[in-house]
């Protein structure tokens, strides 16, 4: 007889339910979130379960990998879709959710979530750390500019030369005009220098990783795409075979319009903004670079400029973001490089 298992996972504990192929509950229990305890409970009540299902969440990636190592057929499913199926219960509890997930495992009515490889997650850690450093530096600069305006000091533009030394020079000069500003300058100048140096070091590490990756170098032949965008694209998608068609990546990243159709009503709205927000932001930045800064002629740039003339910059940048994602996926799947004169077919 086939057995199916549902896991309702929280940070400290896991509710477990085992059902048979007829839907009868065979066992219920609760363990800690330790994979060894979870595996022991499951094997105690089912020697060879057909499916073990849990929802996507904070511990989902780690727990999936650990339970796979222990020989369990673990499947991570989309929590949003699982919620729709579990919401029919009048009373909600961890025990009830675990039983509901076990029935989803039995019926196969779920959407499987791809678990990225550890190598991809490591690259995403570096990209995320770089983004956090840049945000901290921007927040500090914005705070200083706002404080100085109270005292009638308006800081000028700052270049990237010498780790943005111009900002620290202006702050030091403002600190000499008032004791309170001097204390702030003494505290913030070393912090700002450290943040800039750390972000620059992280950029150098990512450039080195991109140079050592043949796929990243091919993706960087696309105008507007640099090391960070290429590595983020590779690490987020992880496996090109996940997509049946290259243009499916646009919908996966939330760069296609929402659609609502019911009876005679059928309309398309703004982009769905599903998927990875950070990669979508990076693609938008790359599209902005393509439209505003790239000078080398190509069919892709000409298409984006024509669209800008018709629809305006923002809509053109969003459409170019989706186009960049599709072109990059084509390069990944076909093992080719970007050809500026090639007619766009995506």
Image (cartoon, rainbow, N blue to C red):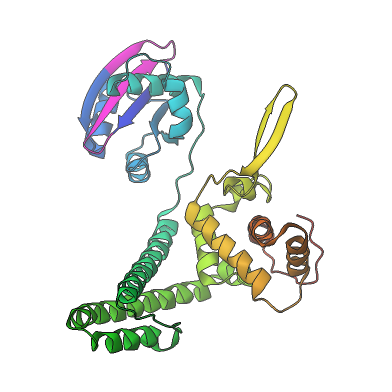
Rendered view: 61 above or below 284: above
Nearer-the-camera pick, 325 or 120: 325
- The residue depicted at 67 percent of the width and 76 percent of the height is 294
Rendered view: 225 above or below 177: above
- The residue depicted at 79 percent of the width and 61 percent of the height is 344
Residue 195 location (% of width, % of height): 32, 75
| Quarter occupied by the N terminus | top left
| Quarter occupied by the C terminus | bottom right
Q: Is residue 222 visible?
A: no
Please state if 12 lies on the left or on the right of 236 as rendered: left
Quadrant of the image occupied by residue 270? top right
- Counting labels gives 0
Residue 112 location (% of width, % of height): 50, 35
Identify the magenta region: 10-27
Residue 106 location (% of width, % of height): 45, 20
Residue 111 location (% of width, % of height): 51, 32
Q: Is residue 199 magenta?
A: no
- The residue depicted at 39 percent of the width and 78 percent of the height is 200
């Amino acid at each position: 007889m086939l057995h199916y298992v549902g896991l309702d996972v929280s940070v400290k504990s896991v509710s477990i339910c085992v059902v048979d192929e007829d839907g009868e509950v065979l066992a219920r229990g609760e363990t800690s979130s330790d994979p060894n305890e979870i595996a022991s409970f499951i094997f105690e009540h089912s020697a060879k379960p057909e499916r073990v299902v849990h929802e996507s969440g904070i511990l989902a990636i780690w727990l999936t990998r650990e339970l796979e190592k222990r020989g369990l057929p673990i499947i991570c499913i989309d929590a949003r879709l699982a919620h729709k199926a579990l919401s029919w219960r009048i009373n909600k509890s961890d025990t009830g959710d675990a039983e509901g997930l076990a029935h989803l495992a039995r019926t196969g009515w779920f959407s499987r979530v791809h678990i990225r490889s550890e190598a991809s997650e490591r690259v995403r850690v570096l990209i995320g750390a770089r983004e956090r450093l840049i945000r901290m530096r921007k927040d500090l600069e914005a705070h200083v500019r706002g404080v100085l305006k109270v005292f009638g000091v308006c800081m000028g533009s700052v270049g990237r030369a010498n780790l943005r030394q111009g900002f620290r020079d202006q702050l030091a000069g403002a600190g000499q005009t008032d004791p309170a500003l001097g204390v702030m300058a003494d505290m913030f100048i070393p912090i700002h220098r450290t943040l800039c140096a750390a972000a620059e070091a992280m950029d150098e590490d990512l450039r080195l990783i991109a140079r050592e990756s043949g796929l990243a170098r091919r993706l960087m032949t696309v105008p507007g795409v640099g090391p960070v965008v290429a590595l983020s694209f590779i690490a987020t998608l992880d496996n090109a075979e996940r997509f049946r068609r290259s243009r499916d990546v646009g919908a996966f990243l939330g760069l296609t319009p929402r659609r609502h159709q019911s009876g005679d009503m059928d309309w398309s709205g703004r982009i769905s903004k599903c998927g990875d927000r950070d990669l979508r932001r990076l693609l938008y930045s790359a599209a902005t670079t393509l439209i505003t800064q790239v000078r080398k002629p190509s069919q892709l740039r000409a298409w984006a400029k024509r669209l800008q003339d018709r629809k305006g910059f923002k809509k053109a940048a969003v459409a170019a973001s989706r186009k960049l994602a599709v072109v990059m996926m084509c390069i990944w799947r076909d093992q080719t490089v970007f050809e500026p004169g090639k007619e766009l077919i995506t």
